[in-house]
Image (cartoon, rainbow, N blue to C red):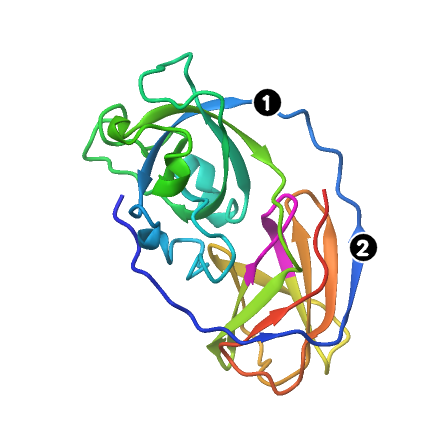
Amino acid sequence: MAPAPAQVVAVVLLTVGYTALAVAASSPQAPVVWQRAHATFYGGADASGTMGGACGYGNLYSEGYGTRSAALSTVLFNDGAACGQCYKIACDRKVDPSWCKPGVTVTVTATNLCPPNNALPNDNGGWCNIPRPHFDMAQPAWEKIGIYRGGIIPVMYQRVPCLKKGGVRFKINGHDYFNLVLVTNVAAVGSIKSMDVKSSDSKDWAPMARNWGANWHSLAYLSGKMLSFRLTNTDGQTLEFNNIVPSGWKFGQTFASKVQFND
């Protein structure tokens, strides 16, 4: 797949006073099962070509995702609902040992979409075509488990909890009446199921809609108001970030919380 153009995004990290409340415990997870797929790589030896992407994380270095990232095929990407999820991947030597590095795994975060190429067969170039599960991994991550000359390798993968430093972060983009909030640095299950916003002049939570990737939007007029966010992850755990955004905020700012989802 063609890498997305690099986006170097300057952020202003502000940690402000707020309270965060866990209002629902996550449900027990089902036993982990290894599944089979294939993996290719992109982005160059330094992964600089993986910046941007369909999840909207922008500069993966500054956002903390580094070179351990992957673009998912359509069936795994799930219209952006998989953004932020983490996968442990190993080369499947039982299928084809030719290009595998034995005894090693690598964990990657879903940051991009590997689009289908319907002009090519599913088993000869159309690796990300429906219904194939496929990982187009950042090259440094892929080379942890595969030998460069192989190009494409059979893999086994499983969902694993995401490990993050610090709390969930919120970056507000957009303009008046279109507030686009990028949610990053999400631990545990890694992905967000729903998001709500509440302004300082309201007592009610208002639902936000997934715009694209990890970006959620509200069409209300929220400019400059103190804001609270409520997130529910795909495991059903809900956190409230009360007054995380202070009054007088500006578009383009990032606000860092001190709380995180847990397994």
- Residue 69 lies, with reference to residue 91, above or below; the image says below
Q: Which three-letter amino acid code belongs to the residue tagged 1?
A: Val
The magenta span reads 183-195
- Hey, which quadrant is residue 171 in on the image? bottom right
Residue 81 point in image, percent of width and height: 52, 47
Nearer-the-camera pick, 64 or 188: 64
Residue 102 point in image, percent of width and height: 44, 20
Residue 226's tag is none
Q: Quadrant of the N terminus?
A: top left
Residue at horizontal 52 percent and vertical 36 percent from the top: 87
Residue 177 point in image, percent of width and height: 52, 79
Identify residue for label 1: 33
Q: Quadrant of the C terminus?
A: top right
Q: Is residue 144 left or right of residue 40?
A: right
Q: Secondary structure at mark 2?
A: strand
| 189 magenta-colored | yes
Q: Is residue 5 left or right of residue 213?
A: left
Q: CA distance from mark 1 to mark 2?
A: 29 Å
Q: Is residue 197 left or right of residue 72?
A: right
Q: Which three-letter amino acid code belongs to the residue tagged 2?
A: Val
Q: Secondary structure at mark 1?
A: loop
Mark 1 or mark 2: whose residue is earlier in sequence = 2
Residue at horizontal 36 percent and vertical 15 percent from the top: 97
Identify residue for label 2: 23
Label 1: few (<14), some (14–19) or many (≥20) C-alpha neighbours in 10 Å? few
Residue at horizontal 64 percent and vertical 45 percent from the top: 234
Residue 179 point in image, percent of width and height: 52, 73
| 250 magenta-colored | no
Q: Is residue 138 visible?
A: no
Q: Is residue 228 left or right of residue 96?
A: right
Residue at horizontal 45 percent and vertical 54 percent from the top: 55
